[in-house]
Image (cartoon, helix red, strand yellow):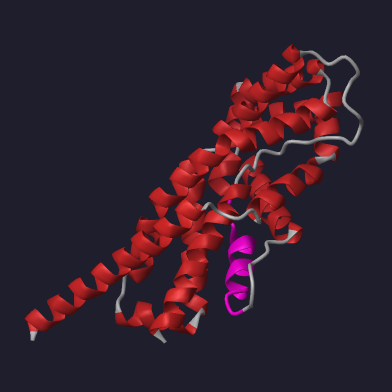
C-alpha cells in the first residue's frame, strides 16, 4: 500500500507540473493563413514582445497555486490511498502542495522562454505586424491588463484536475484532453469578464468588435491546441528527480514528526 500511495503521489506531482504548462489563459486568437511574404525582423520582435506581454501578465504564481490546490483536492478526495493518508495524517495534502510549489515554479521558469517563442511564432505566422500592434495596444491598456488579471484569478483547473486524477490507475503516461483545456479556459474567461468593472467590460467588448478583435476571438480554440500540447509535454528529468526526492522527503518528514508528537503525548 505504501508503494502504491507513493506512486500515486508521484503521479499527481508529475501530472500537476505538466498540466501547469497550459496556464496561459489569455483569450488569444490565431488564424490559419500563411505568414506574410517578406516579413521583417521587426515583425518577429513584435510577435515575441506580444507573447511575453500576455504570458507574463498571467500571474504564474497564483495559477500554480490554483493548479496545485485543484490537483490535491481532487486526488486526496477520490483516491483511496490518499484519502487514507489524509485521514491518518491530516495536512498531508498541504505538505504535498508546499513541496511541489518551488519545483513547479522552477520548471516553468526554465520552460517559459521556449513557450514564449512558440506563441510568438504562432502570432508571427498568422497576424500582420500591424495587427500584432493593435493586439499589444489592447493588452497593455488598463482594460486588457484587468482582463488578464481577472481571467488568471478565476481559473480553477477543475476539468484538468479531474481528468488527471481519473487516470491514476491507468498504465502508461497520462493525457490531458482538448476538452479539459477548453472547459477550464472558457470557464475562466467567462468568470473573468463577468468580474470586471463596467468600464473595463465595455472596453473589452468594444475591442472585441474591431476587425482584429473578431479575428482573435474566432480562432481562440486553435490557441488552446498549443496549450494542450504543452500540458502533455514531459517534464524534465531534473524535475522528476526533485519530485521523487523533495516531495517524498517532505511527506516522510511530516509523517515522522506527527508520529513523534503522538508518541510523546501518550
Q: Which residues are magenta?
A: 155-169
**Relative to 202, does residue 256 appear above or below in the rendering?**
below
Q: On the picture, is 22 further left or further right than 224?
A: left
Q: On the picture, is 218 further left or further right than 251?
A: right
* Residue closer to the observer: 66 or 56: 56
* Residue closer to the observer: 28 or 38: 38
**Relative to 199, does residue 97 appear above or below in the rendering?**
below
Tell me, yes or no, if residue 149 can be seen here.
no
**Residue 58 belongs to the span the image colors magenta:** no
Q: On the picture, is 75 further left or further right than 85?
A: right
Residue most toward the front? 237
**Dominant SS type (magenta):** helix
* Residue closer to the observer: 3 or 95: 3
Residue 119 in the image, given as x and y percentages of width and height: 70, 34
**Residue 167 belongs to the span the image colors magenta:** yes
Which residue shows up at 52% across the image and 78% down it? 78
Viewport quadrant of the N terminus: bottom left
Q: Quarter-wise, where is residue 152 in the image?
A: top right
Tell me, yes or no, if residue 75 can be seen here.
yes
**Relative to 33, does residue 64 appear above or below in the rendering?**
below
Residue 133 in the image, given as x and y percentages of width and height: 74, 17
Total numbered labels: 0
Which residue shows up at 52% across the image and 68% down it? 11
Which residue shows up at 72% across the image and 61% down it? 177
Residue 20 in the image, given as x and y percentages of width and height: 56, 51
Residue 166 in the image, given as x and y percentages of width and height: 62, 74
Amino acid at each position: 500500500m505504501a508503494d502504491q500511495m507513493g506512486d500515486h503521489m508521484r503521479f499527481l506531482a508529475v501530472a500537476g507540473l505538466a498540466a501547469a504548462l497550459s496556464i496561459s489563459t489569455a483569450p488569444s486568437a490565431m488564424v490559419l493563413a500563411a505568414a506574410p511574404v517578406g516579413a521583417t525582423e521587426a515583425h518577429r520582435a513584435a510577435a515575441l514582445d506580444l507573447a511575453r506581454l500576455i504570458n507574463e501578465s498571467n500571474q504564474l504564481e497564483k495559477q500554480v497555486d490554483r493548479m496545485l490546490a485543484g490537483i490535491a483536492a481532487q486526488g486526496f478526495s477520490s483516491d483511496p490511498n490518499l484519502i487514507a493518508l489524509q485521514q491518518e495524517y491530516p495536512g498531508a495534502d498541504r505538505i504535498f502542495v508546499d513541496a511541489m510549489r518551488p519545483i513547479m515554479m522552477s520548471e516553468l521558469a526554465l520552460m517559459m522562454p521556449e513557450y514564449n517563442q512558440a506563441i510568438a511564432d504562432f502570432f508571427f505566422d498568422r497576424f500582420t505586424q500591424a495587427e500584432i500592434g493593435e493586439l499589444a495596444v489592447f493588452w497593455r491598456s488598463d482594460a486588457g491588463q484587468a482582463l488578464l488579471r481577472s481571467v488568471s484569478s478565476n481559473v480553477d483547473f477543475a476539468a484538468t484536475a479531474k481528468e488527471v486524477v481519473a487516470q491514476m490507475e491507468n498504465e502508461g503516461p497520462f493525457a490531458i484532453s482538448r476538452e479539459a483545456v477548453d472547459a477550464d479556459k472558457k470557464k475562466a474567461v467567462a468568470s473573468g469578464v463577468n468580474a470586471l468593472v463596467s468600464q473595463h467590460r465595455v472596453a473589452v467588448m468594444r475591442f472585441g468588435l474591431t476587425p482584429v478583435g473578431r479575428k482573435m476571438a474566432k480562432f481562440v480554440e486553435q490557441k488552446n491546441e498549443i496549450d494542450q500540447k504543452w500540458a502533455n509535454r514531459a517534464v524534465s528529468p531534473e524535475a522528476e528527480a526533485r519530485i521523487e526526492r523533495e516531495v517524498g522527503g517532505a511527506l516522510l518528514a511530516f509523517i515522522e514528526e506527527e508520529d513523534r508528537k503522538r508518541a510523546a503525548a501518550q
